[in-house]
Structures are given as C-alpha cells and as structure tokens.
Amino acid sequence: MFINKKINVISFGEVLFDVFGEEKKIGGAPLNLALRTASYGFPVTMISAVGNDEDGKVILDYGKENTLETAGIIVSPEYETGIVQVSLNERGSATYEIKFPSAWDFISVDEKIMDTVKEADVFFYGSLACRNEVSQKTLFSILDSNDKMFKVFDVNLRKPFYNIQLLEKLMDRADFIKFNDEEILEIAAGMGFESHDLESNIKFISEKTNTKAICVTLGKHGSILLWNDQFYRHEGYPVKVADTVGAGDSFLASLIAKLLSDQNPVDALNFASAVGALVASYSGANPKIENSEIEIFLKQNAYLNI
C-alpha cells in the first residue's frame, strides 16, 4: 500500500486522555498523528511528556505496543498526565475542556532526542502545545534545528490558547499546513484578509507564509489541497458518524504518508478521505483500521468522487 522507502517521522506535542462521560480514551492530536502514521509501517518517534501516574504508564505502554518510539516522552514528577473533557453534540462534533497545567505543557528534550531530530524526514507539530512557554521554546528549538525535514503544521485552535502572532511564526516554519475551514478563515481575517472564498484564503496564506502545500478540511463536505501550485478537491465520503474526534488527525497522517510515498495528489486525497471517514464511524480518536478495511471501503465507494 505504501512505497517501501524509509521515512523517519517525529511528532511533537500533547499526549493525553480524552474523557467521554465515564469513558477514557487515549488521544491528543500529535499522538493520533503518530499512531496512524506508525500503523502504515513508518518509524515514528513521539516527543511529549506524561505524569508519573497510571495514565502516563498506560500511554507509554500503548505507544510501545503500537510500534512508537517513546524515548522522547519524558515522565514528569511534578505534573499529571493530560486530561481533556470531551462533549459531543447530536452530530458527533466535539468541544473540549483541556486541563492546565498538564505534563505535556513542560516538554523538554535531551541531546539524544535532538540527535534523532537531526535524522528526521517528517516533523508533525501543532499550535496547542505552545500554550505554555516551556513546550513552546522546545518546539521552536526543534523547528530551527533541522532545515531538511518536511515540517507539517496541524493547526488546532483551542481558545484561549493561541494568538495570530504565534500562529504566523508557526506557519512561517511549515512546509505543509492543515486547517479546517473555520480555522483558515479566522486566521486569514486576523492577518487582514477578508474573503469567504477558500481558495483565495489558501493562496493568501501560502503567499504570506511562503508555504507551498496547504490542505483545508471541510467536515462532511470533503477537503481542498494545494500541492505543486495546483488545487485538488475531494467531496468526502458519507458515513454514519460516531464522533469526529481524531478523524482529521488520521486524515492528515494518511495524506502525508501517501504524498511522501510519491502517490499522486488525487489518489492521496482519496485514500486520506477514506481513512478519515472510517475513523469518524468509530468511537474515539484511534480505532484500529486494517489496510484491508480501507481497500474494501474504497471499492465500495468507487462511484463517488469520479
């Protein structure tokens, strides 16, 4: 399913438990990205922090069981493993109450991990990990340490943990940016651009930040991708939604995995859209999805997006 070439991947940021009522599930956008990418056979290192508690142990064990390199996840003696209270509306869309402070607000790296960073080909990062200056400083030191790695910025706007100036700095360092439609409109407007046309907003962000590759997800209406100066669209796949938690993360991980495996953008977007839809049909951010299930889903829906 993927071209057999070694691509070393690092994901930086929050690892935590999403709490749905009485149920807890492992999550955090950077961890979701790492887990889905690792499921395709790529070597993935996670850089984060957990508490010296049972939740932290469970996350570390789960990462190892799913072939993640967890040496970059420090264990904090002072702060607890992150917790997010998730509320779902009638459509399965989520809102979040994010505990502060949490261990992942205090991510640090040692010389060994920085050596791993220097060998990385792909680096995933988001905006939420910058809500505290300790993790923010670590992130920027990593971003500035390796000019060769393909930097993928996954925008996750969680009020009140961002501002336009910070987002511009994060975008300036990216080779690829992923937004949802509400995020790109808000950020572009904050930068002085007033338009509701998504392609115009994408072009504006691309020019202002010198980022050549941008993807905007549109929920059930699919996605738009700017890649090599061309726009590609996918209309999305209809599924019965259990919840939307993690669907965008799996979409992004799958899209990057395909694009960097020399897949053409149309096929990459098609594959990523299928994975995102399948994840939304399950509860929780990281359902196990076999390659055979993805292939069957694509065949069953081959009549769409033609």
Image: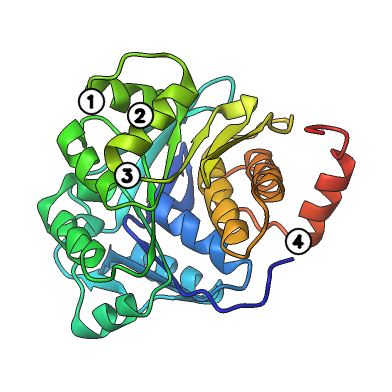
- Which amino acid type is marked by label 1? Met
| Residue visible at 30% across and 27% down in the picture | 187
- Name above or below for residue 228 compared with residue 207: below
Q: Earlier in the sequence, mark 4 or mark 3?
A: 3
Secondary structure beneath dot 3 equals loop
Residue 204's tag is: 2
- Name above or below for residue 306 compared with residue 169: above
- Disc 4 + disc 1, Cβ < 8 Å: no
Q: Is residue 29 left or right of residue 217?
A: left
For the residues labelled 4 and 1, the Cα–Cα distance comes to 41 Å
Residue 210's tag is: 3
Residue 191's tag is: 1
Residue identified by numbered label 4: 291
Whole-percent x and y of residue 79? Answer: 18, 60
Q: Is residue 27 left or right of residue 137?
A: right
- Disc 3 + disc 2, Cβ < 8 Å: no
Q: Quadrant of the C terminus?
A: top right
Q: Earlier in the sequence, mark 3 or mark 1?
A: 1
Q: Which-is-in-front pick, marks 3 and 1?
A: 3
| Residue visible at 61% across and 78% down in the picture | 5
For the residues labelled 3 and 1, the Cα–Cα distance comes to 14 Å
Secondary structure beneath dot 4 equals helix
- Disc 2 + disc 1, Cβ < 8 Å: yes
Q: Nearer the viewer, residue 32 or 142?
A: 142
For the residues labelled 4 and 2, the Cα–Cα distance comes to 37 Å
Q: Earlier in the sequence, mark 2 or mark 1?
A: 1
For the residues labelled 3 and 2, the Cα–Cα distance comes to 10 Å
Q: Quadrant of the N terminus?
A: bottom right
For the residues labelled 2 and 1, the Cα–Cα distance comes to 10 Å
Number of other residues with Cα within 10 Å of mark 3, as a class: few under 14, some 14 to 19, many 20 or more: some
| Residue visible at 69% across and 67% down in the picture | 2
Residue 171's tag is: none
